[in-house]
Amino acid sequence: MIARLFRRAFRPAAMALAIACLALGLSWAIQDRIDGLFDNLVAGVAIGVALVLFAAWYYDSDRARRFGFLLSVWLWSSVAAVAFMNLAGWTSGLLALAWAILAGGSYWAEVDSTRTP
């Protein structure tokens, strides 16, 4: 049985990624971190990924959810790389890497669940 929230299927990994991306996007849009262009790019992509994942939940779209997961992998891998290269702290880099692994694993699980043996 699939858990439901507001009569829609609730996918915890997708919702957690959407909230994390929204938080990342808002924090990078408000604060100056590295470079204005890169900050704005990361903030825009993060907010876009959050909107895609929220829309995928609202419209129950597997295709949009998979697309959101793939964008999340790119986003969080980029954030992890920047954190490691700028020595922003290994904790920030490892947390971003963990989000990237969660997004990749969720994508594989979504793709694998649509295949028929």
Image (cartoon, rainbow, N blue to C red):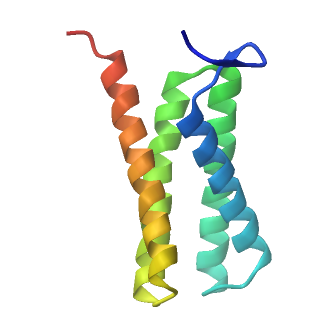
Q: Is residue 17 visible in the rendered structure shown here?
A: yes
Q: Is residue 74 visible in the rendered structure shown here?
A: no
Q: Relative to residue 62, is residue 51 drawn left or right?
A: right
Instruction: Tell me what residue is drawn at x 54 percent, y 9 percent.
Output: 1
Give percent across and percent down for residue 106: 42, 38
Give percent across and percent down for residue 98: 43, 59
Nearest the camera: 114 or 5? 5
Quick check: 43 above or below 49?
A: below
Nearest the camera: 48 or 33? 33
Locate residue 16: give its quadrant: top right
Q: Quadrant of the C terminus?
A: top left
Instruction: Tell me what residue is drawn at x 63 percent, y 55 percent.
Output: 21
Quick check: 73 above or below 97?
A: above
Give percent across and percent down for residue 82: 46, 79
Q: Relative to residue 77, is residue 30 drawn left or right?
A: right
Locate residue 30: give its quadrant: bottom right
Give percent across and percent down for residue 62: 51, 23
Nearest the camera: 13 or 56? 13
Counting labels gives 0
Q: Residue furthest bottom?
A: 87
Q: Relative to residue 42, is residue 7 drawn left or right?
A: right
Instruction: Tell me what residue is drawn at x 40 percent, y 86 percent.
Output: 85
Quick check: 4 above or below 95?
A: above
Instruction: Tell me what residue is drawn at x 67 percent, y 72 percent.
Output: 40
